[in-house]
Amino acid sequence: LSTKIDMKTINALLLLSVYAVKGQDANTPVFTDNIRDDQCSALPHLVPGLADVYTVGVLAIRGFPAAYEEFNTTFSEYLTVTAGKRFERPVKFVMKPLDFESLFNEIASSQVDFFYVNPSAYSCVESEFGAHSLVSQISKRKVGDKEYDLTEFGGVIFARADSGIDTIEQIKDKVVAAASISGLGSGQMQFRKLLQHGLHYLNDPSQVVFTSNQEKVVNGVLKGDFDVGFVRTDQIERTTDEATGGLVDKSLLKVIAPVEGLESGGEPFPFESSTELYSEWNVAALNHVPNNVNLAVQEALVALMDHAEIGELINECYDANNCHEGSDDPQECQNACHVQIPLPTPRCETTPSLANIAYAAQQSGSYSGFRTTLTYMSLRDMQEETGFIRKNPSTGKMHCVRSNDIYDAVMCPKDHFKKSKYDVINGCELAGKSCNGFQCLCKPCVKAFEVGVFLRDKDTDEACDKFSVCGQLEQGKELVFLATDNKKRDEMELTVKVHAGKVVHDILTERVLPEDIIKDDSVSSFVKSQATNHTHVFKVSSDKVGVMMMEVLADGKHIPESPFRILVEPRDCSGVGNNRIPDVEGNCVCAHNTVEEAGNCVEPSQIKNTVLTIMGVLVLGFLSVFLVHRVRAVSRLERDHQMLLNRLNEVVGSTGNFPHGETPIKDGHKELGLGAMMNRNELIDFGVLAIFFIGFTTFAYYNMASTFITYSAI
């Protein structure tokens, strides 16, 4: 043999030397695939009358290809060559990968006989269909250079190291990813932790995405698709980074709220966990499987670790001697390794081929083996606490919430109720959030009220709360409210009282058919979802600006959420005209610094300017008329004067002397006076114009004075 032999191979050789010391001869049995009856009679054959094939359903949390790679050797090949050969007519075992949605359907229709699932799924199946656990898994996990055999695991809440998310409380309004709503290490464990910190796992995050694959959760957080991820302990350490092709660099992530001092089996738990620890995955049988088949499967799985231990020694010998590739005769090389295994082995039925299969199953499944079943009562308590297992009121049996119908799987917090199925299924789309091809939920619950009061035209996702502003309206307009009686009382009388100052208004209500609400395009989808045969409609209006209190009474008693506030805002008068504002009654009147003039509200300065302009025009007109009359009078005076001179010339004649008794006229226009400048009609016109000008000026003066007095009083 080659000198390239590690400690386990050396131990095997030491055991071989012990046999030699004991004086074993050529007749000493050697380790081969041929077992004589006198070598091993511990496992008797079992009675016939069985099925030819038994199916083992495997919950594929990392996808179907990964499930085949990890567990097909265990549940198909290994069980067939062990438990399958315990019967007079050998039976075959086959593995069938299942996701969370198909698991319960397959079990309900008896398409599987055994199932390997997380404890949460087992508890569900046991509650609804009847099943019993056969074995619990002993997981093999490696941290650094050290390996651990673990029978418990926990849940990890994690985020990017640079996310700024350090506490569970900061998960509120973040995007969270988990494998399934009915998953345990990637779901329900973390859900319970959030509840313990006052957060609801579905309604407090802005979005919860279910990937059906924990590796996608880890990579999604790394890429920034999700803010927070939920996975089981050890999942991060064995996830392949899609960007690099290697294992995830754990330094890029951080565990939120890790529990200090966790122990498993009396030893410190080697992984960070945000939750307490629960029993590992288990293999269980449905009630229709015969007990002798259950016994064979249980014994075979418990024995797997012992078989695999021998298989490990054999494979170390193979590797040390290059039996796989470097040997000229691989079979001879392998046989040489087989004969070095000392007998008896821990299990007398162990053979080289069985040991190799068990070792391959152990390595591909990343576990050490199986042990007789652990208890799962603490898990059951957790599920009842979170509401994932509850009594079905119609059957009286415990019912498990599962994810094949995401709507049915939604459990709302206390004092909340679930939105309509349409709003839950399409909630993320309605909120403008993408699910990226996964199942997802966006705040599927709303606060529950005895009577939910909604503003009909408001795009809301919850009813009005006590003392909340339930609506806003303008003076003179009205709001339409819907009130749904969640207690569904057929004879309940709904009354509404609105307090506006000291005045109390009784508002009439009437029932409305849900179809009338649903076909109304102005109603939001959420409000439509709340419409039932117990929905009432009523209208509220007011002319008074301020805050009104609205009381809602059911059969004369205030509902717990009452009263509500309604804000009444000033009327918008911009459409009526400029410079108008609402008065206390909601009428649009002229603003304080304006007066009404010909149906318009104008400022006093505008009236003053108008009056002064008119007065100026009149003054100018008067002066113009006066000047025209003056010019005409002067012209007439000059004409008359000339005529007078001509007449004098005629009288005097050539002597140049005036007639006896006549006096010559020197300044005729002064002698003639005003009458010489204007004739009688012109003088009357001028007098009328002067009187009109004086009257208008007086009117304008007193009108302006009145305006200014009014403005000053205001």
Image (cartoon, rainbow, N blue to C red):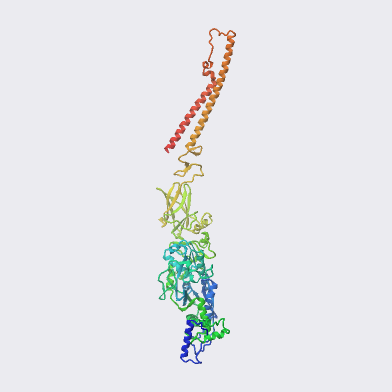
Q: Position of residue 100 (x, y in %)?
A: 51, 70
Instruction: Point out residue 649 in the picture as x, y percentages from the top left corner.
Output: 58, 11
Q: Nearer the viewer, residue 469 or 139?
A: 139
Q: Position of residue 174 (x, y in %)?
A: 47, 62
- 287 vs 544: above or below: below
Q: Nearer the viewer, residue 6 or 124?
A: 6
Q: Splitting the image into 4 quarters, where does residue 198 fall?
A: bottom left
Q: Residue at x 50, y 25 (%)?
A: 690
Residue 363 seen anywhere in this rendered image of the structure: yes
Residue 495, above or below 637: below
**In-image side of 640 versus 203 (left or right):** right
Decide: is 393 above or below 661. Answer: below
Kindly give the residue lying farthest to the front in the view shown. 3
Q: Work out whether residue 67 or residue 546 is closer to the camera in this orientation and state it.
A: 67
Q: Quadrant of the C terminus?
A: top left
Name the residue rendered at 42%, 64% in the picture: 197
Asked where in the image residue 324 lies, by quadrant, the reply is bottom right
Is residue 50 among what the camera can see?
A: no
* Residue 282 image offset from top left, x and y in percent: 47, 75
What is the count of numbered marks? 0
